[in-house]
Structures are given as structure tokens and as C-alpha cells.
Image (cartoon, helix red, strand yellow):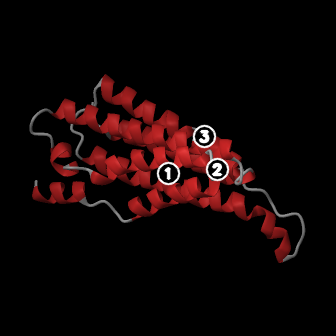
């Protein structure tokens, strides 16, 4: 099987995740600018989570461009990733409503950490399927951002017990780290 159906299914799930997150945004009660102030934390958590989903969508798309064969292991690894990403709407809403509490910041970080691990596992499964001449392995190389992200999420989770805002700052730092497009796979495809 090629990756077309896998990518289409994943795109649909990610679109639904974004839709659920936007539906969690509430309409302001009132007609003045002041009515928007209570909604700012929810909106900011939505923006950060939207960017996270966008980053995963973009990198997932690039990864599947070099995936020549989809096996059962690839399908299950992909579902594992989608499972963790599907929890983002709940944790996004919770952290938006309770941005100064520790538990929502911890759970948000745990979901981000597990999604990062699931993405890494999917990447490793695809590399295993491709064998020694894996294009994906050549593309990801040392993968310093992929290794730094789980470490930063773990730091954020620990920080959330003492300072939820510090934890949220760490999660935003990871977003900023990945915001620049990752061109490693594009370079390998051009060379191919």
C-alpha cells in the first residue's frame, strides 16, 4: 500500500481536531472590547495548539513523501500519533479555562510529550520499513529538534507543578523552535 490513503485519513483527523478546538472558543458576552478580555487565555491556548497541529501536519506530510511502503506497523504507529493529537482539543480548552492552575499545564505537557514520542516512533517504524538505504533516515540525520522537544516538554511538565506560566512558556518555546519550516526532507527529495 502507498501512503496516499494514510495521508488522507491523517489529514481528515487533523482537520477535525482543529475544528473541535475552534468550536471550544466562546462568543463574547457583551458588545464592548472589554467583553473580549476574559476570552484571551482561551484564544491564546487555541493559537498555540493550532500551531502545534499545523507543525505536525506539515512534518507528517513531508515524512510521508519519502514513505514508499505502508505496512501494518506504520498504520498502527500513525494511529498512535493521531490518538495523542486527538487529545489536544480537551487539554487546550482546559488550560485555556484554567491557565494559572498546575494540573491543566501538566496534562497539556503530557499530551505534547506523548505526541512527540509517538511521532518519533512513527518515524522509526518508517525508517525500519525502508531499511538501510532509508531516505527518511538520511533526511532526519541527528534530529536535534526532535530530541530537544521531549526534553523541553519534560522540563515544562515538571515546572507546571511550581509555575504553570513557566511551563506554558516552555511549551511556546518548543512551538517557536519548530515554527521555522523543516527543510531536511525536501533537501533529500531534491537530491534524489
- Disc number placed over residue 75 in the picture, else none: none
Among numbered discs 3 and 2, the one appearing first in the sequence? 2
Residue for badge 3: 107
Instruction: Write down the quadrant of residue 123 in the picture.
Output: top left
Q: Is residue 89 visible?
A: no
Residue for badge 2: 21
Q: Nearer the viewer, mark 3 or mark 2?
A: 3
- The quadrant of the image that shows the N terminus is top left
Q: For the residues marked 3 and 2, what is the alpha-carbon distance in whole angstroms?
A: 16 Å
Residue for badge 1: 53
For the point 56% across and 49% down, the residue is 159
Q: Is residue 138 visible?
A: yes
Relative image position of residue 31 (x, y in whole percent): 88, 73
Label 3–label 1 contact, CB within 8 A: no
Q: Secondary structure at mark 1?
A: helix
> In terms of depth relative to the viewer, which is nearer, 56 or 7?
56
Relative image position of residue 69 (x, y in whole percent): 23, 33
Crowd rating for badge 2 (residues with CA inside 10 Å; few <14, some 14–19, many 20+): many
Of all residues, the one furthest to the front in this rendering is 162
For the point 28% across and 52% down, the residue is 144
Of all residues, the one furthest to the bottom in this rendering is 33
Label 2–label 1 contact, CB within 8 A: yes
Instruction: Write down the quadrant of residue 33 in the picture.
Output: bottom right
In this rendering, would 150 be left or right of 107?
Answer: left
Crowd rating for badge 3 (residues with CA inside 10 Å; few <14, some 14–19, many 20+): many
Among numbered discs 2 and 1, the one appearing first in the sequence? 2
Q: Secondary structure at mark 3?
A: helix
Amino acid at each position: 500500500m502507498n501512503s496516499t490513503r494514510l495521508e488522507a485519513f491523517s489529514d481528515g483527523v487533523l482537520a477535525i481536531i482543529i475544528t473541535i478546538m475552534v468550536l471550544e472558543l466562546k462568543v463574547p458576552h457583551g458588545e464592548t472590547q472589554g467583553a473580549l478580555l476574559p476570552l484571551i487565555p482561551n484564544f491564546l491556548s487555541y493559537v498555540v495548539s493550532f500551531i502545534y497541529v499545523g507543525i505536525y501536519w506539515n512534518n507528517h506530510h513531508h515524512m510521508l513523501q519519502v514513505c514508499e511502503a505502508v505496512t501494518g506497523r506504520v498504520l498502527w504507529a500513525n494511529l498512535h500519533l493521531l490518538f495523542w493529537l486527538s487529545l489536544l482539543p480537551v487539554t487546550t480548552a482546559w488550560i485555556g479555562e484554567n491557565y494559572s492552575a498546575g494540573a491543566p499545564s501538566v496534562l497539556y505537557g503530557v499530551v505534547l510529550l506523548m505526541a512527540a514520542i509517538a511521532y518519533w516512533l512513527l518515524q522509526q517504524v518508517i525508517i525500519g520499513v525502508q531499511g538501510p538505504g532509508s531516505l527518511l533516515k538520511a533526511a532526519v540525520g541527528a534530529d536535534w529538534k526532535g530530541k530537544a522537544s521531549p526534553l523541553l516538554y519534560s522540563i515544562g511538565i515538571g515546572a507546571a507543578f511550581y509555575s504553570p506560566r513557566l511551563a506554558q512558556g516552555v511549551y511556546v518555546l518548543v512551538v517557536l523552535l519548530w515554527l521555522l519550516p523543516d527543510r531536511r526532507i525536501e533537501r533529500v527529495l531534491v537530491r534524489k
